[in-house]
Amino acid sequence: MMVEPGTILWAMLAHIAFGMQNFLIGYSNTLPLDGVACCAVLWMASGVVGVIVGVFFLRSHGSFFFQDVGCEGAPLSVKVKLVTIGGSLCVGFAQFLMKKSFALAPRNTGPLCAVISSDVIVISIFCHFVYWELMNKWQIGCVGAIVSGLVVMALGSGGEGGVVSIDDDTAVEYPLWALLFSMLGMFSFAAGVLCIRAGFTENIAAWSSFISRMTVIGLLGLGTYICATPASGSPDATLLMWCVPVVTGVLQAAGVFGIIKALQFKNTGIANAIFASNSVLVMILQVVVLQQVPHWLALLGMVIVIGAVVTIALSQDAPSAGDMAPLTCSGGLIVTSRSYSSC
């Protein structure tokens, strides 16, 4: 299969953006920042990016919800708009679970990120049974491999009695609870992506999905900051420290943009393989910057999970004539149902 240079370029942007975002979410736990306020600022930063882009399209389309030029049909239903908003909330909730997970087991940030990144398998299974985007034998085998990898990670993360001492005697890790939160985050991220997939059934434009998603996340952050942030705030935090969640939010927006551009090409499997394996970058940053090395069993489980995710993304059958039935228009290109076989 011929790989378009644009696929690699934009997918690598998404890989780097999401890898750095996930690392900074874990790094923020080492700073004297209130956890809820940190998430709120992250979401608001993403929302600012969405609003800035949205203003441009608002002038030409008159709404944040619109269809691709040349693909307009019946107006977007209230259902699709609600699904888009619901998907945005799922993403925000998943990021909150990710932060909680990393805080419970900082040294397992890389493996835990691998668990969250394996949402691609949840999406593939859902599409297999609901949208009849059937998996081949390699992809089915990857389901068992990912389950095995998660079990190995659970064994490696358990330590002695599920609590592992770190630098001082007063600090402990709770890796099994961290694994549970990361698995919940995986399902929440998967729900967010499936909501985007559902939006394509009515030809919602990719940019519209991006703008709406970022704007809703921004409003979620604003509401959270106003209602849930303690009045005392984070007195020991400096302005430079608050730049961490701001940069994290911008990276999230950049990652979503990279995915949208990468999926405009026909190498969907290659693109998924690149940006879904960002936990490798997280682990490297974790070791280099924070000198936090996970247990070897947790690392082994991470390798198994990443290998399975990459395999399921790359092991797509050659499309048949039936597979190439158009699903929707995106960015002026026809996106087929087969293109979303690995979602």
Image (cartoon, rainbow, N blue to C red):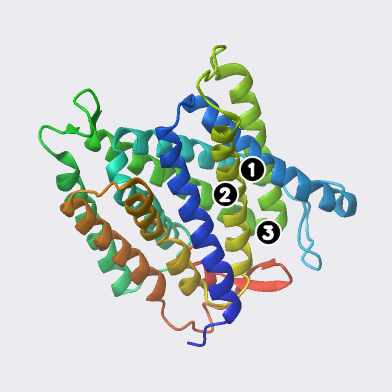
Q: Secondary structure at mark 3?
A: helix
**Given the image, on which type of amino acid does mark 2 rest?**
Gln
Relative to 224, residue 136 above or below: below
Residue 271 position, x and y percent, is: 50, 70
343, 101: nearer the viewer:
101
Residue 78 pos. (x, y %) = 70, 41
Sequence-first tag of 3 and 2: 3
Sequence order check, earlier mark of 3 and 1:
1
What is the secondary structure assignment of the residue under circle 2? Answer: helix
Q: To which residue does mark 2 refer?
A: 252
Confirm or deny contact between disc 2 and disc 1 (CB under 8 A): yes
Q: Look at label 1 and name its amino acid.
A: Ser
Mark 3: amino acid: Ala
Marks 2 and 1 sit apart, C-alpha to C-alpha, by: 7 Å
Badge 2: few (under 14), some or many (20 or more) residues near its Cα, within 10 Å? many
Residue drawn at x 29%, y 51% as measured from the top left: 111
Q: Position of residue 246 (x, y in %)?
A: 60, 39
For disc 1, the marked residue is 46
Corner quadrant of residue 88: top right
Q: Are marks 3 and 1 in contact (CB under 8 Å)?
A: no
Work out how far the residue at label 3 is from the one at label 2, CA to CA, in angstroms. Answer: 16 Å
Q: Position of residue 330 (x, y in %)?
A: 68, 66
Question: Nearer the observer, disc 3 or disc 2?
Answer: 2
At a point 39% along the width and 46% down the height, the residue shown is 186
- Looking at the image, tell me whether mark 2 or mark 1 is earlier in sequence order: 1
Residue on which disc 3 sits: 206
Residue 164, above or below 114: above
Residue nearest the observer in this picture, 164 or 269: 164
Q: Mark 3: few, some, or many residues within 10 Å (few <14, many ≥20)?
A: many
Proximity of marks 3 and 2: CB atoms separated by less than 8 Å: no
